[in-house]
Amino acid sequence: MHPMVKPALRRGWRDLDTVQFGMTPAHALTLGPLDRATGGFLDLLDGTRGLPLLREEARRSGLPDGRVDALVERLAGAGLVDDARGGGPDADALREKREVLGRLRPDLASLTLTTSEPGGALARLAARRALRVQVRGAGRVGALLASVLSGAGVGEIDVRDDGRVEPWDVAPGGLPAESVGERRDTAARAAVRRAAPDRPPRRPRSPGSGSGAADPGLSLVILAPRDDVAVHAPDPRTAEPLLASGTPHLYAGVVEGTGVVGPLVLPGESGCAGCLHEDRTDRDPVWPRLISQWGSGRARRIGACDLTLATAVSGLAAAHALAFLDGGAPAATGTRWEVSAPGLTWHSRPVRPHPACGCGAAERGRESGKTEHFSTDGRPRATMAVQRPSAKRRSEAGAARPTGTWRAHV
Ligand SMILES: [Zn+2]
């Protein structure tokens, strides 16, 4: 191990023997008591030295035996230490690609704040390369969202849509002006390739397979429809094959000036489009009548989906998608997040498993004695304390679930 105090957090001495790591309440924590000599040793924990060399340096500067190991252990216990050589073979391979890693450094730094095991951040970043995500819809939201995921290192993004690029599909980071008139899916896939920090991973060829490529299954499907009725009232029938195959899926889009992210559906575990539909029908019996009118025949209008809202929705949806793909349970699980002008405050609305829905989430909830599995705790973290305030949330976020364990075949 080559211990490195996580460089993503700035350090400051609160008093003579207490160090504060980080500035913001979400990730900051304090460590103490720590004498000055030991504290000064923190600078040597920069990933360039292994433990034997560090022990030697400690002896030279007069620190007692065992002090270095105790310090590293204590820092590691607080989730403050990364291993400059850790993370396994995939992480090693990514380390070799200096240009690729150069592009992803800020993403890696972010991951160090949400992983506690040394080497875990680079391991997660490297694992993204093997993931396969499908994005359905390549309008302002879908194309940008797909590009963001690609830029963040997700290896394969398959964008699906029909028709040709219209002038109003163009968005910075998404479909470029030059693509107007091209096939929408082709243009979006080109945007995804341009955003990727690395060449797409090679799929191992399976012997005897006609197409030549083994299908690794989809880790996640993102439904980002251009049609605003589909955003507001996602059709449960569209999700049926995804539920049947156990494929996690996430909704995102803009409807009449309201941005929507979620729910992230874990089939059979959290509320789905069908649950949402049943719940809305319970609350408002004319809901189905309205949907059929909204969706009927008239020529498609151009929806109110301004660039800032489309960008905000794309970014938040990509963040929730990545949090899930990296092995967590983001706050969009079983929840719809909505934002509208002029307040621009994100509100969460739970999508509870409904007993009339065939997805099985309600039965599962009853079996385990609770209907809500997932924390939607969006409250700001309280104060900087000795304990890292987000530790509870991180463990709730399913740190034990290895990346991609929800991978299913469609
Ligand atoms: Zn359901």
Image (cartoon, rainbow, N blue to C red):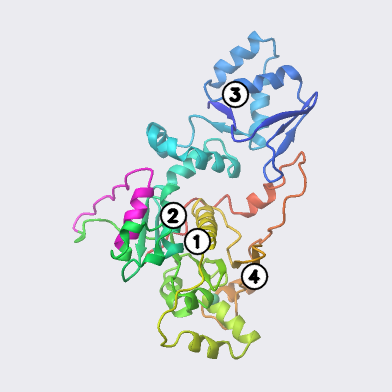
Q: Is residue 189 left or right of residue 255?
A: left
Looking at the rendering, the quadrant in which ligand 1 lies is bottom right
> Where in the figure is residue 168, as x and y percent of width and height?
41, 66
Does residue 191 appear anywhere in the picture?
A: yes
Instruction: State whether label 4 is within 8 Å of ligand 1.
Output: no
Label 2 crowd (10 A; few <14 / some 14-19 / many >=20): few
Q: Residue at left 76%, top 24%?
A: 34
Q: CA distance from mark 1 to mark 3?
A: 44 Å
Tell me where the magenta segment starts and ends, as one range.
Answer: 186-208
Does dot 1 land on a helix, a strand or a loop?
helix
Q: Amino acid at mark 1?
A: Leu
> Disc 2 and disc 4: Cα gap in Å?
29 Å
Residue most extreme to the right: 15
- Dot 3: what SS? loop
Residue 349, numbered circle: 4
In primary-sequence order, the first of circles 1 and 2 is 2
Mark 1–mark 4 distance (CA, rounded to whole Å) = 24 Å
Residue depicted at 50% across the width and 73% down the height: 231
Residue 198 belongs to the span the image colors magenta: yes
Name the N-terminal-most of marks 2 and 3: 3
- Residue ID for mark 1: 307
Per the image, label 2 sits on a secondary structure element best described as: loop
Label annotation for residue 172: 2
Amino acid of disc 4: Arg
